[in-house]
Amino acid sequence: MMRQAEEVLRRVWGYDVFRGRQAEVVATIASGQDALVLMPTGGGKSLCYQVPALMRPGTAIVISPLISLMQDQVATLLQLGVRAAYLSSSLDAHEARAIESQLLDGRLDLLYMAPERLVTARTLDLLQRVPISLFAIDEAHCVSQWGHDFRADYLGLAVLAEQFPQVPRLALTATADLRTRADIIRLLRLESAPVFLSSFDRPNLFYRILPRLNAMEQLTDFIRREHPGDAGVVYCLSRAKVEKVAAALQAQGFPALPYHAGLPAQVREANQTRFLREEGIIVVATIAFGMGIDKPNVRFVAHLDLPKSLEAYYQETGRAGRDGLPSTVCLFYGLQDVIKHQQMLMQSEGSEEHKRHERRRIDAMLQLCETTDCRRQLLLRYFDEHLPQPCGYCDTCSEPVATWDATEPSRLALSAVYRTGQRYGVEYVVEVLTGKRSERVAANQHDQLPLFGQGQSLALKSWRSVFRQLLAKGLLQVDGDGFGTLRLDPSCRSLLKGEVSLTLRQDRDTLTAQRQARGRSKAAVAVDSADQPLWLALRACRRALAEAQGVPPYVIFHDSTLLAMVEHMPLSLQEMRQIGGIGDSKLSRYGEAFLAVIREHVDALA
């Protein structure tokens, strides 16, 4: 069986060996068993069902949550010579009937559809009339209310176990903690299925988190210095901020496009199409721009607001470097992020259990931001994975964090919150600490407090850093009144009494830190200057072929395949066949075109 699987892998995808636990999953599904697969973004989850789909009789049904994701997967499979199609609301009745006819005639290897379509009586009746090789449930964490992207339509997928008990079912996800995994198993009826848990580590991603002071200046400096001309995604929480940031980047000369659910559908589609099909486009987006993005050469992901959880952060940063080449993920994080998230939690109408769960998720996200240890170790620990040594490939490893004894300033900050009646936000309390006699301070007679002006030895930004970290550590809380009102948490009592000390991060000037860090992320595609002409010529050839067919360039070949061509310079189809990522179909379609580019380059060197 595995010889057959390896032959399919080599013939269709152009790879000689499976990665990680792919081979085990393929063997399990190909033999007719169910499985739950947890594999990082870019780890090759799709192959886990696509290879068995070509080994087993019948059509594989793939449940996917987004039309754009289906379209991308189908376009890629068609390039590989695989008979694939999708059924979605984007098709008219005639197109949908034509695809259903292909299914009934046995002319499809894989058929993609959304969960809400699959669970309809009409679709289930259609599927009962044809041989089904397997069911693949992608983004399976959507079935859990504890997951970061719950979708009620996924709950109906339990019907597959009832109506198709002999067809193997494969659930796949890149992000699921223990509670979410338990939900997937229970709700999708996978109690007897083996669980394949791969490492969540993305070793090609350089993690960096910086205090946010001037977000636009920091962002533009980051892109210019580390990723000029690269494709990237910038995430913001609000639609208004998305449009503001996109406009600001455009004004600075960057090819930036906005994307959020409030834009007209045709604008969203046009912007996403440009991002997928053109090189170097930057999309500024809310999380509405997410799961459907399968572009492999996104070289950076930047967050200008704090994600709501580590699951969301991992999923969103996972859109960078899906091709395995070095990429950077950068989060600019500030005091207002902590206040906003705590306010949202306080205002939530969920149950107390739900609030406790959300509190734990926020606390884990804040811990990642404020840690002085290896970020990768902490991130992987959250997903129950142990990394024995610091990674050496994140900002805290590359530039160890300076700390300071903040016991007395922290006690002073907590005392100021208490003495002002726990009725004000950070900015007001800082006014009192730094001795600013504003109209409001004077009216409240807080300039008469003994601690008024006792904090003048610290700069304004340093006080904001202290309050940010006290909030992140849970020593302070924010009321849900919408004004950012601070109150003491009972856990601060031992610090106020002088029973414990407190060490905090020492924030450096963020732009200076960015500029000193440049180069340490090693996140640019490395091509020697002598090879640049060939690299650019191969990219131009790929772009021309893609434009002629109306598909994204990466559907032709990934950057990693072009880099291998640069390195090995094959001069015959036989030599080109040895390069990873070139299967029989692509060799036949594109081999001669790329060989002509390489031969021309070699002749020029002679």
Image: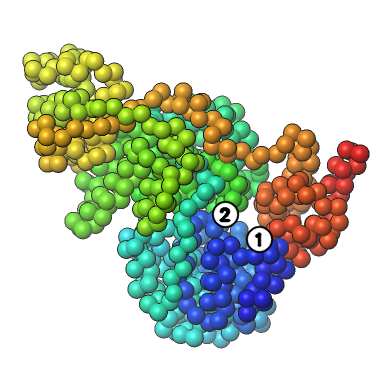
Q: Position of residue 189 (x, y in %)?
A: 38, 77
Q: Quadrant of residue 67?
A: bottom right
Res. 445 visible in picture? no
Labels 1 and 2: the sequence-earlier one: 1
Q: How is the image coloured?
A: rainbow
Residue 294: mark: 2
- Three-letter amino acid code at disc 1? Thr
Residue 76: mark: 1
Res. 157 visible in picture? yes
Look at the numbered disc 1 and give the secondary structure of its residue: helix
Distance from Cα at disc 1 to Cα at disc 2: 10 Å
260 vs 363, left or right, is: right
- Three-letter amino acid code at disc 2? Asp
The image shows a total of numbered marks equal to 2
58 vs 433, left or right, is: right
- Rendered position, 283 above or below 252: below
